[in-house]
C-alpha cells in the first residue's frame, strides 16, 4: 500500500467540492452523496461553509483504489483564501485542477495553474459539468492552451456534450497526444518526424514521465454530479502521479498545513510527514519563522494521533495525520527540515482592519478568539492597538465577513470591523545610531544604558535584532526586554506605518545594580530606537496588486485608458476570437476604483481579478 496526497483546486463554483464528494462516494468512503447546495458535503463541514456554499478551509478525506490510498485535500476557491491553497500545495504529491465546461478558464484558474507550473507539481486537468447546457470541449481546449499552458492534450472524449446524456470515452494514445508530447520531448519528436512512429507504450511512458515532472498536463472530461468520467480520472491519477520519494532517515520531517480548534479549545494540527515516523506520546519540536524574522521553537507531546484513512497510527512517511496535544502549534510550523522547493510564497495581506467587541464585557473573549484564529491563519497578524482594539491583516472583504461570522458562531462574540484600509510599510533608508545613559524622560529616571544602531535588512527578512555588546554584560531578562520592545516599537515608524526589513544592533548597554529592572529597559528602548530611526530615515512603501481583466473586443481602449489614469502599469495585452486579456500591476488603493469602473466600460461583460504582488516605494503626489 502506498499513499498519494492529491489536491482538488478550482475557481469558485467550478465543482471541486462536488468532485471530492463523488470520489469519496464512488469508492465507499461515504455512504451518501452530499450536495453543496444542500450543505451536507463531507469536506465543507463548517456551518459557514455550508450556508455560503463555498470552501473556506482545506479539508482532508481518504479513499482506497487497489493498493493505493488517496488522500484528497479540498481547497478554497475564492481568491481571499489563496493563502490556504498555497499552504496545501506544499504538502501535495499531485493536483487535479477543475474547470467548468460552461464557464471555462476563469481568473482564479489562471492563478492556480501559474502556481502549479512554478512548483512543477504533477497536475491533471478535469473539465467538469459536461452535461450542462452550454458545455464546450474543442474551443475550451484551445482556451486552455492559450490561457493556461500549451502543453496539454485530451485523454478522454465526450459524446452528447451539453446534454443530460453526455458520456465519456477514453481516447487511445494516438497522433494528437504524440504531437503534443513531441513539443517537449526530443526523442518523441525524432520518432514522430523520422520514424518509426512511437508505440502506445512509448506514448504512455512519455506521458507518465512528463506528467510526473509537471511539464505536461493531461485533460479529462466528466461530470462530478452525474459521475461520468470520474473513474477515468481516478485511474489516471494512480497511473500518472507518483508518490513523493522518501529517504531512509529515521528523523521525522514534516509540515503543519492546517490547524483546527476543538470544542474544548484543544487544537488539532494536520501534519504531512516526509520522512521518519511519529507515534502517540512522542514529544515533537517544531520550528517557526515569526513575522519579524526571528526563529522560534515550539514543543509538545502528541496525546492523540489519527492517520487519515488509517486509524490511530503510527504516522509514516508520505501520510497525513491529525495530531492533538501540541498546544502551541501553528500553521506553517516545521518538524525537522522538510523540503523547501514547494514552500509557500505569500505576498502579505494588503488590507488592515480593527476589530472591537460590540459588547465591552466580551473584549477579553474577542482577543482570545482572534489569537486562536491567527493560529489557523498566521498571515492575519492579530495585534493589540493603543485604542484597545485588535488589528488584523486581511486579503479581502469576503475574508472579513467570514471572520465576523466565525467569531459569532464558534466563539459567541459579536464583533464590529472597521472599514479595511490599505496597509503601508516603511523600510530604513540608511544607518542611524543613538545612545542614552541613565536618562530622564517624561519625568521618569531610567536606570539603564542603551545604544542601538538601525540599518536596512534584506528584502523579505522582516526584523532582525543582534548584539555587538559582550555576552553576559546584561542579565538575560534585560536583553529580552530590549529585543521584545524593539520589535514591538517597530510597528509604528516615522510615517505611522509598520517598519519591516530592518536590522537593529545593540551597540552599548549598562545597568545599575540593584536599581535597574527590566521595566527600565522596556521604557528607555523606544526613545533610543526612535532617535536612531530618525537618523537612519525611512522610505514609505505601498502594496501593489497584479491584475488581469478580460474585456470584450470593442473595449480594450477605454479600459486601458481608465487603468492608466489610475496609475496602472501594463505587462501584456493578448487578443482572442471573443475577448482581450489585459494584465499588469496597480496600487492596491486603486484596485476598488478600477474594478468599479469596469462594468460601465464593457457593457457589464468585463471580468476583473487581482491579487497582492508585493510593494513599491510611494510616489510623490
Image (tube, helix red, strand yellow):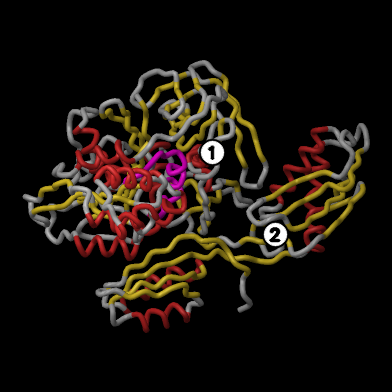
As displayed, is residue 427 above or below residue 387?
Answer: below
As displayed, is residue 198 above or below residue 269?
Answer: below
Q: Nearer the viewer, mark 1 or mark 2?
A: 1
Quadrant of the image containing the C terminus: bottom right
Residue at x 36% of width, y 67% of height: 608
As displayed, is residue 551 above or below residue 222?
Answer: below
Cβ atoms under marks 1 and 2 closer than 8 Å: no
Residue at x 47% of width, y 29% of height: 267
**Magenta portion: prevailing SS class:** helix
Regarding residue 109, the answer to whether it shows in the image is no
Regarding residue 492, the answer to whether it shows in the image is yes
Q: What number is the disc on residue 339?
A: 1
The location of residue 568, given as percent across then percent down, is 49, 75
Q: Nearer the viewer, residue 100 or 198?
A: 198
* Element on which disc 2 rests: loop
Q: Quadrant of residue 314?
A: top left
Q: Is residue 453 magenta?
A: no
Q: What number is the disc on residue 394?
A: none
> Which contiguous range is marked in magenta?
79-96
Q: What residue does disc 2 label?
A: 493
Residue at x 71% of width, y 51% of height: 489
Q: Would you call the spot at circle 2 few (<14 residues within 10 Å), some (14-19), or many (20 or more)?
A: many
Rounded to the nearest angstrom, the CA distance separating label 1 from label 2 is 36 Å
Q: Would you call the spot at circle 1 few (<14 residues within 10 Å), some (14-19), or many (20 or more)?
A: few
The location of residue 114, given as percent across then percent down, is 42, 57
Amino acid at each position: 500500500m502506498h499513499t498519494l496526497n492529491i489536491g482538488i483546486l478550482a475557481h469558485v463554483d467550478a465543482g471541486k467540492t462536488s468532485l471530492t464528494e463523488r470520489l469519496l462516494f464512488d469508492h465507499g468512503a461515504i455512504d451518501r452523496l452530499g450536495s453543496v447546495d444542500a450543505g451536507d458535503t463531507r469536506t465543507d463541514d463548517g456551518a459557514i461553509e455550508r450556508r455560503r456554499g463555498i470552501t473556506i478551509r482545506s479539508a482532508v478525506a481518504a479513499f482506497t483504489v487497489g493498493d493505493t490510498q488517496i488522500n484528497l485535500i479540498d481547497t478554497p476557491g475564492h481568491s481571499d483564501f489563496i493563502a490556504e491553497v498555497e499552504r496545501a500545495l506544499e504538502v501535495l504529491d499531485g493536483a487535479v485542477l477543475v474547470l467548468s465546461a460552461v464557464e471555462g478558464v476563469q481568473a482564479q484558474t489562471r492563478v492556480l495553474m501559474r502556481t502549479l507550473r512554478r512548483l512543477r507539481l504533477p497536475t491533471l486537468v478535469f473539465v467538469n459539468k459536461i452535461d450542462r447546457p452550454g458545455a464546450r470541449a474543442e474551443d475550451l481546449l484551445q482556451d486552455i492552451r492559450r490561457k493556461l499552458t500549451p502543453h496539454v492534450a485530451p485523454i478522454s472524449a465526450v459524446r452528447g456534450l451539453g446534454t443530460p446524456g453526455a458520456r465519456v470515452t477514453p481516447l487511445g494514445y494516438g497522433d494528437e497526444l504524440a504531437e503534443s508530447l513531441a513539443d517537449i520531448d526530443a526523442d518523441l519528436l525524432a520518432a514522430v518526424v523520422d520514424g518509426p512512429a512511437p508505440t502506445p507504450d512509448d506514448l504512455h511512458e512519455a506521458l507518465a514521465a512528463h506528467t510526473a515532472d509537471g511539464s505536461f498536463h493531461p485533460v479529462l472530461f466528466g461530470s462530478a454530479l452525474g459521475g461520468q468520467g470520474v473513474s477515468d480520472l481516478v485511474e489516471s491519477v494512480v497511473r500518472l502521479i507518483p508518490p513523493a520519494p522518501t529517504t531512509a532517515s529515521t528523523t521525522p520531517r514534516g509540515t503543519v498545513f492546517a490547524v483546527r480548534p476543538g470544542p474544548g479549545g484543544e487544537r488539532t494540527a494536520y501534519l504531512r510527514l516526509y520522512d521518519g515516523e511519529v507515534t502517540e506520546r512522542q514529544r515533537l519540536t517544531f520550528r517557526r519563522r515569526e513575522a519579524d524574522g526571528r526563529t522560534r521553537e515550539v514543543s509538545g507531546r502528541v496525546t492523540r494521533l489519527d492517520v487519515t484513512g488509517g486509524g490511530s497510527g503510527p504516522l509514516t512517511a508520505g501520510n497525513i495525520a491529525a495530531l492533538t496535544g501540541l498546544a502551541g502549534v501553528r500553521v506553517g510550523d516545521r518538524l525537522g527540515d522538510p523540503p523547501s522547493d514547494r514552500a509557500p510564497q505569500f505576498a502579505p495581506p494588503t488590507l488592515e482592519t480593527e476589530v472591537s467587541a460590540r459588547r465591552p464585557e466580551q473584549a477579553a473573549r474577542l482577543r482570545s478568539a482572534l489569537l486562536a484564529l491567527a493560529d489557523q491563519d498566521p498571515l492575519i497578524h492579530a495585534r493589540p492597538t493603543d485604542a484597545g482594539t485588535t488589528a488584523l491583516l486581511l486579503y479581502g472583504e469576503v475574508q472579513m465577513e467570514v471572520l465576523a461570522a466565525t467569531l459569532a458562531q464558534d466563539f459567541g462574540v459579536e464583533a464590529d470591523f472597521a472599514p479595511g484600509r490599505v496597509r503601508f510599510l516603511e523600510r530604513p533608508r540608511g544607518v542611524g545610531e543613538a545612545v542614552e545613559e541613565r536618562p530622564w524622560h517624561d519625568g521618569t529616571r531610567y536606570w539603564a544604558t542603551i545604544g542601538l544602531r538601525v540599518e536596512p535588512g534584506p528584502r523579505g527578512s522582516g526584523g532582525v535584532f543582534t548584539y555587538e555588546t559582550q555576552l553576559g554584560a546584561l542579565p538575560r531578562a534585560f536583553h529580552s526586554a530590549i529585543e521584545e520592545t524593539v520589535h514591538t516599537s517597530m510597528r509604528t515608524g516615522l510615517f505611522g506605518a509598520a517598519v519591516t526589513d530592518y536590522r537593529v544592533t545593540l551597540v552599548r548597554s549598562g545597568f545599575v545594580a540593584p536599581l535597574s529592572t527590566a521595566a527600565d529597559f522596556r521604557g528607555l528602548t523606544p526613545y533610543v530606537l526612535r532617535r536612531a530611526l530618525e537618523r537612519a530615515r525611512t522610505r514609505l512603501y505601498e502594496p501593489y496588486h497584479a491584475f488581469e481583466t478580460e474585456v470584450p473586443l470593442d473595449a480594450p481602449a477605454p479600459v486601458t485608458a481608465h487603468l492608466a489614469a489610475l496609475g496602472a502599469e501594463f505587462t501584456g495585452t493578448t487578443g482572442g476570437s471573443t475577448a482581450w486579456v489585459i494584465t499588469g500591476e496597480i496600487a492596491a488603493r486603486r484596485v476598488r476604483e478600477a474594478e468599479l469602473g469596469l462594468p460601465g466600460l464593457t457593457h457589464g461583460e468585463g471580468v476583473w481579478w487581482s491579487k497582492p504582488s508585493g510593494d513599491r516605494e510611494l510616489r510623490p503626489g
